[in-house]
Amino acid sequence: MVDRLLVPYDGSAAAAEALRYAFETFPDATVEVLYVVEPFAAHTDAGSDDARREWRDRAAAIAGERFDEARAIAAEYDAAIETEWRYGRPGHEIVDRVAADDVDQVVMGCHGRSGIERLMLGSVAETTIRRSEVPVTVIPEA
């Protein structure tokens, strides 16, 4: 029985489909939406306290926008979601979140990259599948 789902959400069409799939397939489960802010040069902890606070505030605002989108999808199913945002490499943060709590399953979207693009960019879904301690359901981008 699946009581608690983790749905990584990046605002993509695939992530929205994964969230809809979670509500349709597991209507009684608690759904946690996770948004991961990916690191890049402007988001380092280097610099002044003001600079760190500014990027964290911006990251929190972006996460809030993604959570508003996810709440709108949840409302279509008369459901609620829990939310969390993290900073780091998405695949690793998803796996770390699974290991840290009582998540029974991950439901996530996949952009369907292949070939050299996948080698260069990596695959969050693949990292999650390979490293997760719980089952992972991948919903392809339509």
Image (tube, rainbow, N blue to C red):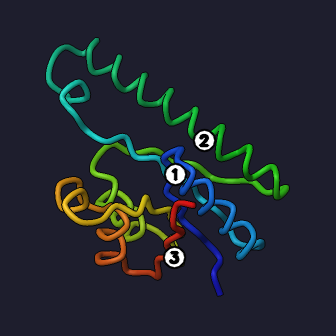
The residue indicated by pointer 3 is 137
On the image, the x and y values in percent for residue 50 come to 28, 12
Which element carries disc 3, helix, strand or loop?
strand
Q: Earlier in the sequence, mark 3 or mark 2?
A: 2
Real-space Cα distance between discs 3 and 1? 14 Å
Give the residue displayed 42% in from the left and 68% down from the top.
98
Give the residue displayed 73% in from the left and 50% down from the top.
73
Q: Earlier in the sequence, mark 3 or mark 1?
A: 1
The residue indicated by pointer 2 is 67
Left-right relation of 104 to 92 = right
Image quadrant where one finds the C terminus: bottom right
**Amino acid carrying mark 2 in the image:** Phe
Give the residue displayed 35% in from the left and 66% down from the top.
95
| Residue at the outermost front position | 115
Could you classify mark 2 by the number of other residues whose Cα lies within 10 Å: few (under 14), some (14-19), or many (20 or more)? many
Q: Are marks 1 and 2 in contact (CB under 8 Å)?
A: yes
